[in-house]
Image (spheres, helix red, strand yellow):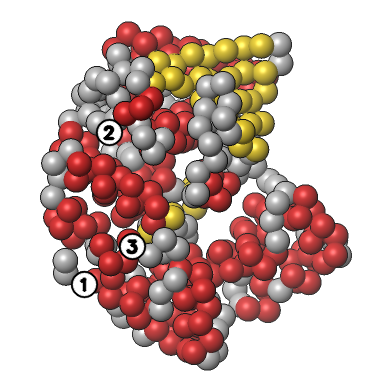
Protein backbone atom coordinates (compact mmCIF):
# COMPACT_ATOMS: atom_id res chain seq x y z
CA UNK A 1 0.00 0.00 0.00
CA UNK A 2 2.96 2.33 0.50
CA UNK A 3 6.39 2.60 -1.03
CA UNK A 4 9.57 3.49 0.84
CA UNK A 5 11.64 5.10 -1.93
CA UNK A 6 9.80 8.41 -1.90
CA UNK A 7 10.47 12.03 -1.03
CA UNK A 8 8.26 14.98 -0.15
CA UNK A 9 8.55 18.62 -1.21
CA UNK A 10 10.52 20.64 1.31
CA UNK A 11 7.60 23.10 1.27
CA UNK A 12 5.74 20.91 3.75
CA UNK A 13 8.77 20.61 6.03
CA UNK A 14 9.20 24.40 6.00
CA UNK A 15 5.50 25.04 6.58
CA UNK A 16 5.17 22.57 9.46
CA UNK A 17 8.46 23.71 10.99
CA UNK A 18 7.47 27.39 10.86
CA UNK A 19 4.10 26.54 12.38
CA UNK A 20 5.72 24.56 15.19
CA UNK A 21 8.15 27.40 15.94
CA UNK A 22 5.16 29.77 16.02
CA UNK A 23 3.69 27.59 18.77
CA UNK A 24 6.89 27.80 20.80
CA UNK A 25 9.04 24.99 19.42
CA UNK A 26 12.82 25.35 19.24
CA UNK A 27 13.82 25.37 15.58
CA UNK A 28 17.36 24.07 16.04
CA UNK A 29 16.23 21.17 18.21
CA UNK A 30 13.54 20.13 15.75
CA UNK A 31 15.89 20.38 12.77
CA UNK A 32 18.47 18.27 14.60
CA UNK A 33 15.87 15.59 15.37
CA UNK A 34 14.84 15.54 11.71
CA UNK A 35 18.42 15.51 10.42
CA UNK A 36 17.91 18.72 8.45
CA UNK A 37 19.23 22.26 8.31
CA UNK A 38 17.43 25.50 7.63
CA UNK A 39 19.88 26.14 4.77
CA UNK A 40 18.68 23.00 3.02
CA UNK A 41 15.03 23.86 3.53
CA UNK A 42 15.44 27.37 2.11
CA UNK A 43 15.88 25.97 -1.40
CA UNK A 44 12.32 25.52 -2.73
CA UNK A 45 13.15 22.52 -4.93
CA UNK A 46 14.77 20.36 -2.26
CA UNK A 47 13.03 17.23 -1.00
CA UNK A 48 12.81 15.53 2.39
CA UNK A 49 11.97 12.00 3.44
CA UNK A 50 8.56 11.08 4.88
CA UNK A 51 10.39 10.20 8.12
CA UNK A 52 11.81 13.73 8.36
CA UNK A 53 8.42 15.33 7.81
CA UNK A 54 6.84 12.98 10.36
CA UNK A 55 9.48 14.02 12.91
CA UNK A 56 8.55 17.68 12.47
CA UNK A 57 4.82 16.98 12.81
CA UNK A 58 5.40 14.89 15.95
CA UNK A 59 7.33 17.85 17.35
CA UNK A 60 4.30 20.01 16.62
CA UNK A 61 2.07 17.63 18.59
CA UNK A 62 4.48 17.72 21.53
CA UNK A 63 4.79 21.50 21.55
CA UNK A 64 1.13 22.37 21.01
CA UNK A 65 -0.58 19.29 22.44
CA UNK A 66 -3.01 19.68 19.57
CA UNK A 67 -3.87 17.24 16.79
CA UNK A 68 -5.18 20.20 14.78
CA UNK A 69 -1.67 21.69 14.65
CA UNK A 70 -2.64 24.86 16.49
CA UNK A 71 -4.51 26.06 13.40
CA UNK A 72 -8.14 25.80 14.57
CA UNK A 73 -10.24 27.77 17.03
CA UNK A 74 -9.98 25.05 19.68
CA UNK A 75 -7.32 22.48 20.50
CA UNK A 76 -7.96 18.79 20.08
CA UNK A 77 -5.84 16.82 22.52
CA UNK A 78 -3.25 14.41 21.18
CA UNK A 79 -4.77 10.95 21.47
CA UNK A 80 -8.25 11.77 20.17
CA UNK A 81 -7.46 10.27 16.76
CA UNK A 82 -6.28 7.04 18.42
CA UNK A 83 -9.50 6.87 20.41
CA UNK A 84 -11.54 7.33 17.23
CA UNK A 85 -9.49 4.76 15.34
CA UNK A 86 -10.40 2.12 17.93
CA UNK A 87 -14.06 2.73 17.12
CA UNK A 88 -13.56 2.79 13.35
CA UNK A 89 -11.78 -0.58 13.30
CA UNK A 90 -15.06 -2.11 14.50
CA UNK A 91 -17.11 -0.67 11.62
CA UNK A 92 -18.38 -2.96 8.88
CA UNK A 93 -17.98 -0.73 5.82
CA UNK A 94 -16.23 2.42 4.63
CA UNK A 95 -19.55 4.28 4.73
CA UNK A 96 -20.07 3.29 8.37
CA UNK A 97 -16.52 4.37 9.26
CA UNK A 98 -16.83 7.80 7.63
CA UNK A 99 -20.22 8.39 9.25
CA UNK A 100 -18.88 7.46 12.70
CA UNK A 101 -15.78 9.63 12.13
CA UNK A 102 -17.87 12.66 11.17
CA UNK A 103 -20.24 12.22 14.13
CA UNK A 104 -17.33 11.72 16.54
CA UNK A 105 -15.41 14.80 15.46
CA UNK A 106 -18.52 16.93 15.44
CA UNK A 107 -18.99 16.01 19.11
CA UNK A 108 -15.44 16.53 20.36
CA UNK A 109 -13.76 18.98 17.96
CA UNK A 110 -15.17 22.50 18.10
CA UNK A 111 -12.66 23.90 15.63
CA UNK A 112 -13.39 21.54 12.74
CA UNK A 113 -16.40 19.67 11.38
CA UNK A 114 -16.80 16.74 9.00
CA UNK A 115 -19.77 15.62 6.96
CA UNK A 116 -20.43 12.68 4.66
CA UNK A 117 -22.66 13.86 1.80
CA UNK A 118 -24.16 11.29 -0.58
CA UNK A 119 -25.79 12.69 -3.72
CA UNK A 120 -27.03 10.00 -6.12
CA UNK A 121 -23.87 8.15 -7.22
CA UNK A 122 -21.41 10.65 -5.71
CA UNK A 123 -20.02 10.72 -2.17
CA UNK A 124 -18.26 13.70 -0.66
CA UNK A 125 -16.39 13.69 2.66
CA UNK A 126 -16.51 17.35 3.58
CA UNK A 127 -14.11 19.22 5.90
CA UNK A 128 -14.92 22.67 7.32
CA UNK A 129 -12.96 24.87 9.71
CA UNK A 130 -14.83 27.06 12.19
CA UNK A 131 -12.37 29.88 11.47
CA UNK A 132 -10.51 29.24 8.21
CA UNK A 133 -8.56 32.50 8.62
CA UNK A 134 -6.45 30.80 11.30
CA UNK A 135 -5.26 28.34 8.64
CA UNK A 136 -3.70 31.05 6.49
CA UNK A 137 -1.64 28.71 4.30
CA UNK A 138 -4.30 25.96 4.22
CA UNK A 139 -1.85 23.66 5.98
CA UNK A 140 -4.51 22.14 8.21
CA UNK A 141 -6.97 21.57 5.36
CA UNK A 142 -4.29 19.80 3.29
CA UNK A 143 -3.36 17.70 6.29
CA UNK A 144 -6.93 16.67 7.17
CA UNK A 145 -7.83 15.76 3.60
CA UNK A 146 -4.66 13.69 3.33
CA UNK A 147 -5.31 11.85 6.60
CA UNK A 148 -8.95 11.19 5.81
CA UNK A 149 -8.11 9.71 2.46
CA UNK A 150 -5.17 7.60 3.61
CA UNK A 151 -6.49 6.24 6.89
CA UNK A 152 -9.85 5.06 5.49
CA UNK A 153 -7.94 3.55 2.54
CA UNK A 154 -5.89 1.58 5.04
CA UNK A 155 -9.05 0.47 6.85
CA UNK A 156 -10.47 -1.10 3.69
CA UNK A 157 -7.12 -2.42 2.42
CA UNK A 158 -7.15 -0.54 -0.87
CA UNK A 159 -6.70 3.01 -2.03
CA UNK A 160 -10.08 4.71 -2.33
CA UNK A 161 -10.21 5.99 -5.93
CA UNK A 162 -10.99 9.68 -5.88
CA UNK A 163 -12.79 11.40 -8.73
CA UNK A 164 -11.96 14.89 -7.47
CA UNK A 165 -10.62 16.78 -4.49
CA UNK A 166 -12.25 20.12 -3.75
CA UNK A 167 -10.42 23.04 -2.15
CA UNK A 168 -12.13 26.28 -1.17
CA UNK A 169 -8.94 28.26 -1.82
CA UNK A 170 -6.99 29.31 -4.91
CA UNK A 171 -4.43 26.95 -6.43
CA UNK A 172 -1.24 27.21 -4.32
CA UNK A 173 2.29 27.47 -5.68
CA UNK A 174 3.06 23.92 -4.51
CA UNK A 175 0.00 22.37 -6.18
CA UNK A 176 2.23 20.12 -8.30
CA UNK A 177 2.78 18.09 -5.12
CA UNK A 178 -0.97 17.48 -4.88
CA UNK A 179 -0.61 15.01 -7.75
CA UNK A 180 1.34 12.77 -5.36
CA UNK A 181 -0.96 13.44 -2.42
CA UNK A 182 -4.29 13.08 -4.18
CA UNK A 183 -4.37 10.97 -7.38
CA UNK A 184 -7.25 12.82 -8.99
CA UNK A 185 -8.37 16.10 -10.49
CA UNK A 186 -8.15 19.00 -8.04
CA UNK A 187 -10.81 21.71 -8.12
CA UNK A 188 -9.85 25.07 -6.60
CA UNK A 189 -12.10 27.85 -5.31
CA UNK A 190 -14.79 25.22 -4.70
CA UNK A 191 -17.71 25.80 -2.35
CA UNK A 192 -16.00 23.74 0.36
CA UNK A 193 -13.17 21.28 0.97
CA UNK A 194 -13.98 17.66 0.21
CA UNK A 195 -12.81 14.27 -0.98
CA UNK A 196 -15.09 13.23 -3.85
CA UNK A 197 -15.54 9.60 -4.91
CA UNK A 198 -18.03 7.08 -6.27
CA UNK A 199 -20.75 6.37 -3.71
CA UNK A 200 -20.43 2.64 -4.45
CA UNK A 201 -17.11 2.73 -2.58
CA UNK A 202 -19.04 3.26 0.65
CA UNK A 203 -19.97 -0.43 0.60
CA UNK A 204 -16.30 -1.52 0.69
CA UNK A 205 -15.78 -3.65 3.82
CA UNK A 206 -13.38 -2.69 6.60
CA UNK A 207 -10.80 -5.51 6.72
CA UNK A 208 -8.16 -4.42 9.22
CA UNK A 209 -8.03 -5.81 12.77
CA UNK A 210 -7.36 -4.32 16.18
CA UNK A 211 -3.91 -5.95 16.20
CA UNK A 212 -3.03 -4.39 12.85
CA UNK A 213 -4.33 -1.04 14.09
CA UNK A 214 -1.87 -1.09 16.99
CA UNK A 215 1.05 -1.44 14.58
CA UNK A 216 -0.37 1.28 12.33
CA UNK A 217 -0.85 3.73 15.18
CA UNK A 218 2.69 3.19 16.43
CA UNK A 219 3.98 4.84 13.24
CA UNK A 220 1.64 7.80 12.72
CA UNK A 221 1.98 10.33 11.21
CA UNK A 222 4.60 8.57 9.07
CA UNK A 223 1.93 6.38 7.48
CA UNK A 224 0.25 9.46 6.09
CA UNK A 225 3.32 10.91 4.40
CA UNK A 226 4.52 7.81 2.61
CA UNK A 227 3.55 7.45 -1.04
CA UNK A 228 0.63 5.14 -1.56
CA UNK A 229 0.68 2.56 -4.34
CA UNK A 230 -2.25 4.06 -6.21
CA UNK A 231 -4.56 2.01 -8.37
CA UNK A 232 -3.00 0.74 -11.56
CA UNK A 233 -2.77 3.71 -13.85
CA UNK A 234 -0.09 3.55 -16.53
CA UNK A 235 1.81 6.13 -14.50
CA UNK A 236 1.79 3.84 -11.45
CA UNK A 237 2.91 0.86 -13.51
CA UNK A 238 5.79 2.79 -15.07
CA UNK A 239 6.94 4.16 -11.71
CA UNK A 240 6.84 0.68 -10.19
CA UNK A 241 8.89 -0.79 -13.04
CA UNK A 242 11.43 2.03 -12.83
CA UNK A 243 11.80 1.53 -9.08
CA UNK A 244 12.21 -2.22 -9.45
CA UNK A 245 14.57 -2.16 -12.44
CA UNK A 246 17.74 -4.23 -11.96
CA UNK A 247 19.82 -2.34 -14.53
CA UNK A 248 19.76 0.85 -16.58
CA UNK A 249 18.79 -1.16 -19.65
CA UNK A 250 15.48 -1.86 -17.92
CA UNK A 251 14.70 1.84 -17.51
CA UNK A 252 14.40 2.66 -21.20
CA UNK A 253 11.04 3.66 -22.60
CA UNK A 254 11.25 0.90 -25.19
CA UNK A 255 11.95 -1.81 -22.59
CA UNK A 256 9.07 -0.75 -20.33
CA UNK A 257 6.66 -0.32 -23.24
CA UNK A 258 7.46 -3.85 -24.39
CA UNK A 259 6.83 -5.19 -20.88
CA UNK A 260 3.45 -3.46 -20.97
CA UNK A 261 2.73 -5.03 -24.39
CA UNK A 262 2.54 -1.79 -26.36
CA UNK A 263 4.70 0.44 -28.49
CA UNK A 264 6.71 3.26 -26.97
CA UNK A 265 4.56 5.74 -28.88
CA UNK A 266 1.39 4.28 -27.36
CA UNK A 267 2.86 4.41 -23.88
CA UNK A 268 3.88 8.04 -24.32
CA UNK A 269 0.35 8.88 -25.40
CA UNK A 270 -1.23 7.08 -22.43
CA UNK A 271 1.08 8.86 -19.99
CA UNK A 272 0.26 12.21 -21.60
CA UNK A 273 -3.46 11.53 -21.08
CA UNK A 274 -2.69 11.00 -17.37
CA UNK A 275 -0.79 14.30 -17.28
CA UNK A 276 2.72 12.86 -17.17
CA UNK A 277 5.74 12.29 -19.36
CA UNK A 278 8.07 9.31 -19.30
CA UNK A 279 11.19 11.41 -18.81
CA UNK A 280 9.66 13.29 -15.88
CA UNK A 281 8.65 10.05 -14.18
CA UNK A 282 12.14 8.64 -14.71
CA UNK A 283 13.77 11.81 -13.37
CA UNK A 284 11.50 11.81 -10.31
CA UNK A 285 12.38 8.19 -9.51
CA UNK A 286 16.10 8.87 -9.93
CA UNK A 287 15.84 12.03 -7.83
CA UNK A 288 14.14 10.19 -4.96
CA UNK A 289 16.59 7.29 -5.17
CA UNK A 290 19.55 9.69 -5.14
CA UNK A 291 18.22 11.57 -2.12
CA UNK A 292 17.79 8.32 -0.22
CA UNK A 293 21.28 7.12 -1.16
CA UNK A 294 22.81 10.45 -0.11
CA UNK A 295 21.53 9.73 3.38
CA UNK A 296 23.99 6.81 3.55
CA UNK A 297 27.41 8.29 4.45
CA UNK A 298 29.14 5.07 3.36
CA UNK A 299 28.45 5.90 -0.28
CA UNK A 300 30.52 8.45 -2.16
CA UNK A 301 28.71 10.92 -4.37
CA UNK A 302 30.14 9.18 -7.43
CA UNK A 303 28.74 5.86 -6.17
CA UNK A 304 25.33 7.44 -5.63
CA UNK A 305 25.42 8.80 -9.17
CA UNK A 306 26.28 5.39 -10.62
CA UNK A 307 23.49 3.73 -8.67
CA UNK A 308 20.94 6.01 -10.30
CA UNK A 309 22.40 5.69 -13.79
CA UNK A 310 25.10 8.36 -14.17
CA UNK A 311 28.55 7.11 -15.08
CA UNK A 312 30.07 10.60 -14.93
CA UNK A 313 29.96 12.42 -11.56
CA UNK A 314 29.71 15.79 -13.32
CA UNK A 315 26.59 14.68 -15.21
CA UNK A 316 25.02 13.47 -11.96
CA UNK A 317 25.83 16.76 -10.23
CA UNK A 318 24.25 18.78 -13.07
CA UNK A 319 21.10 16.63 -13.04
CA UNK A 320 20.77 16.67 -9.25
CA UNK A 321 21.14 20.44 -9.13
CA UNK A 322 18.47 20.76 -11.80
CA UNK A 323 16.14 18.52 -9.77
CA UNK A 324 16.67 20.10 -6.35
CA UNK A 325 18.42 23.43 -6.83
CA UNK A 326 21.55 22.35 -4.94
CA UNK A 327 24.49 20.04 -5.66
CA UNK A 328 24.66 16.52 -4.15
CA UNK A 329 27.53 17.65 -1.90
CA UNK A 330 25.61 20.61 -0.49
CA UNK A 331 22.53 18.44 -0.08
CA UNK A 332 24.50 15.86 1.89
CA UNK A 333 26.01 18.55 4.13
CA UNK A 334 22.49 19.82 4.78
CA UNK A 335 21.46 16.36 5.95
CA UNK A 336 24.39 15.70 8.26
CA UNK A 337 25.55 19.13 9.41
CA UNK A 338 24.92 19.74 13.11
CA UNK A 339 22.70 22.82 13.36
Q: CA distance from mark 2 to mark 3?
A: 22 Å
Which residue is pictured at 68% across the width and 46% down the height?
232
Quarter of the image where one finds residue 25: top left
- Left-right relation of 23 to 165: left
**Would residue 93 be seen by someone viewing this image from the given angle?**
no
Quarter of the figure with residue 240: bottom right
> At which x and y percent is residue 269?
82, 57
Q: Label 3: which residue?
A: 42
Which residue corresponds to mark 2?
69
Few, some or many residues within 10 Å of mark 2 (<14, 14–19, 20+): many
In the displayed structure, 103 sits above or below 191; it is above
Instruction: Determine the residue positioned at 48% across, 17% down.
Output: 98
For marks 1 and 2, the one nearer the N-term is 2
- Residue 221 in the image: x percent, y percent? 33, 40
* Residue 293 horizontal side relative to residue 255, left or right: left
Label 1 to label 2: alpha-carbon separation: 28 Å
Which of 77 and 187 lies nearest the eye of the viewer? 187
Quadrant placement of the C terminus: bottom left
* For discs 2 and 3, the disc positioned in front in the rendered view: 3
Residue at 21% over, 57% down: 31
Which one is in front, 141 or 195?
141
Q: Which residue is mark 1?
A: 337
Please give left or right for residue 10 compared with residue 207 in the image.
left
Sequence-wise, which precedes: disc 2 or disc 3?
3
Q: Position of residue 242 (x, y in %)?
A: 62, 65
Observer-nearest residue: 185 or 191? 191
Looking at the rendered structure, the secondary structure element under dot 1 is loop
Amino acid sequence: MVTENHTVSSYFARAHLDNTVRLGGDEQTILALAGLTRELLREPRTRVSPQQLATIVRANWRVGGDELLGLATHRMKVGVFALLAERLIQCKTLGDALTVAADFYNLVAEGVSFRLVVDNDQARFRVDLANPHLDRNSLLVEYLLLVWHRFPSWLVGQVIPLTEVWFDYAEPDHSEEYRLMFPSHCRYLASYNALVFDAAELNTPVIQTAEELAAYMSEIPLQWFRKQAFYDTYTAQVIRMLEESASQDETSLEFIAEKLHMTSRTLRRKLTVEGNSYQQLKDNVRRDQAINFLGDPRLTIAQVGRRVGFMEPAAFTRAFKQWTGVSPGIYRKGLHKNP
